[in-house]
Image: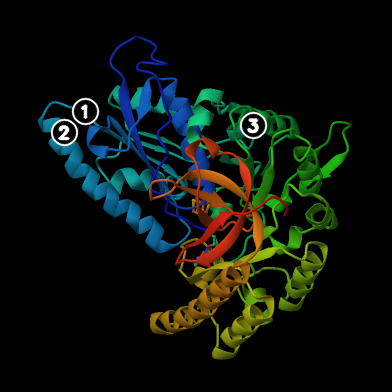
Amino acid sequence: MTQDSALLPAPEIAPNEGLRDGSNSRKVFIKTYGCQMNVYDSTRMSDALARDGYEPTEDMEEADLVLLNTCHIREKAAEKVYSALGRLREMKKKKAASGREMMIGVTGCVAQAEGEEILRRAPAVDVVIGPQTYHRLPEALRRAKDGHRVVDTEYALEDKFEHLPLAEAKKIRARGVTSFLTVQEGCDKFCTFCVVPYTRGSEVSRPVSQILEEAQKLVDGGVREITLLGQNVNAWHGAGPNGEEWSLGDLLYRLAEIPGLARLRYTTSHPRDMDDRLIEAHRDLRALMPYLHLPVQSGSDRILKAMNRRHTAAEYMTLMERIRAARPDIALSGDFIVGFPGETDEDFEATLRLVGEVRYAQAFSFKYSTRPGTPGAEMKDQVPEEIKAERLERLQALLLRQTQEFNESCVGKTIDLLLEKPGRLPGQIIGRSPWLQSVNVDAKASQIGDIINVRITGTGTNSLFAEFAEAEV
Ligand code: 5AD
Ligand code: SF4
């Protein structure tokens, strides 16, 4: 599920819009690492900064402010940030020599985890701000402008959801027809490999009224598909309109009533929080897309226990069967870690067997990466790098075959396609299938946002091809 999304689409902003003092506008470049929640947060930061006169740019050279919105999930992700900061230091010096100031901020999970340490290791950094304190970013930047180096990572639980401003419809429209919406943040599960409980804190659910307000704003701005986000999104719970306790399933039923909101998704879930109501929602709601990302991490009960996953492989399989029974066309997706401390060949074989039984449409797999401060880091029997690499290669070959098989099974089918954005070739539009595949089809740009009937004609490396189909699905 991790992605290294290059950047925010630049929203269309009229010159000087949002400037308080009418001076020349400043430019901000935001580089987003990690998960979809970081992508969402980058958008929200961009919105907040627009109010202070910062226009987004995709050219780092012209930026007055560079923000690295970082990920700490694996060692490689965190190291990438430090090498980027090394390069930025040079750029900052060069700019300073020609009389231009460039501020550098580190946000996201590395900021939360490392705090002050970043100032020590990266002398060019002006501001370090964690995921729960973004609403104080403009203030931190003002203090930095006065020559202070600012670290702001202390928070109260409600902070984040209380204070972020929502974007205007015009901006939303410029970003496209699909959107993320964070409904939950943090994690109380404490899987022994994972930094998330330390970087994103404990589980907090956003209140129903805020979620509905934001969803309505997105729809008013032309959004047709919303993906609800949370590190443990299916742990979301809240009070319904009459004070009754709602789970994520109830929230989805309510969101599905919003006129114009054609599609709903949610990610990422934990098997322990897949309750009956959520499975019913998959059965009942046409707007809820038939795609579920449900990480299992390993197929070995011994390793699942050491990971503190609090479920067995058989329980996961039973859950998958129940979900498939509720929504037979559902595409299943998962995350896997190979080479967790103590993982033997037999444990790994159990993972391959589980994958063989589930038949994933899509999956993400990683070598175990030691994260300081987590229980896994202290465990004996760390697995040598070569073995991890070998296991990952075998697992990925199997998962890739399954994805290809799933994609090939779609050829000849007539499906609903949400037209999303222009494709690479003129006249081509990229759409999203119900199963989250990218599909290329010849269509007009004016049709973006429409859901059309297409017939899948073939598969490419990362996408499918389709042609218009006569009505009926
Ligand atoms: N090492 C390797 N992969 C990890 N993940 C989380 N922590 C680690 C780690 N320490 C993977 C899990 C998770 C996904 C987001 O990243 O598979 O589901
Ligand atoms: Fe990375 Fe996890 Fe933070 Fe997302 S929440 S940015 S995956 S560490």
Compared across the picture, whether 228 is left or right of 46 comes to right
Q: Amino acid at mark 3?
A: Val
Q: CA distance from mark 3 to mark 2?
A: 41 Å
Q: Residues within 10 Å of mark 3 (few under 14, many from 20)?
A: many
* Render colour scheme: rainbow
Q: Which residue is mark 3?
A: 219
The residue depicted at 42 percent of the width and 53 percent of the height is: 4
| Residue 180, quarter of picture | top right
User: Disc 1 marks which amino acid?
Assistant: Glu
Look at 76% across and 47% down and name the residue there: 248
Label located before the other in sequence (1 or 2): 2
Q: Earlier in the sequence, mark 3 or mark 1?
A: 1
Q: Position of residue 189 (x, y in %)?
A: 67, 59
Q: Quadrant of residue 376?
A: bottom right
Looking at the rendered structure, the kind of residue marked 2 is Lys
Q: Secondary structure at mark 2?
A: helix
Can you tell me whether the CB of the residue at mark 1 lies under 8 Å from the nearest atom of ligand 2? no
Do the residues under discs 3 and 1 have CB atoms within 8 angstroms? no
Q: Is residue 430 left or right of residue 456?
A: left
Q: Pointer 1: residues within 10 angstroms few (<14), some, or many (20+)?
A: some
State the CA–CA distance, disc 3 to disc 1.
Answer: 39 Å
Mark 1 lies on residue: 101
Against 430, residue 370 (above or below) is: below
Residue picked out by circle 2: 95
Q: Are marks 1 and 2 in contact (CB under 8 Å)?
A: yes
Q: Nearer the viewer, residue 29 or 402?
A: 402
**Quadrant location, the N terminus:** bottom right
Q: Is residue 417 visible?
A: yes
- As rendered, which of 454 and 21 lies closer to the eye? 454
Q: Is residue 353 left or right of residue 104?
A: right
Residue 378 percent coordinates (x, y): 51, 71
Label at residue 375: none
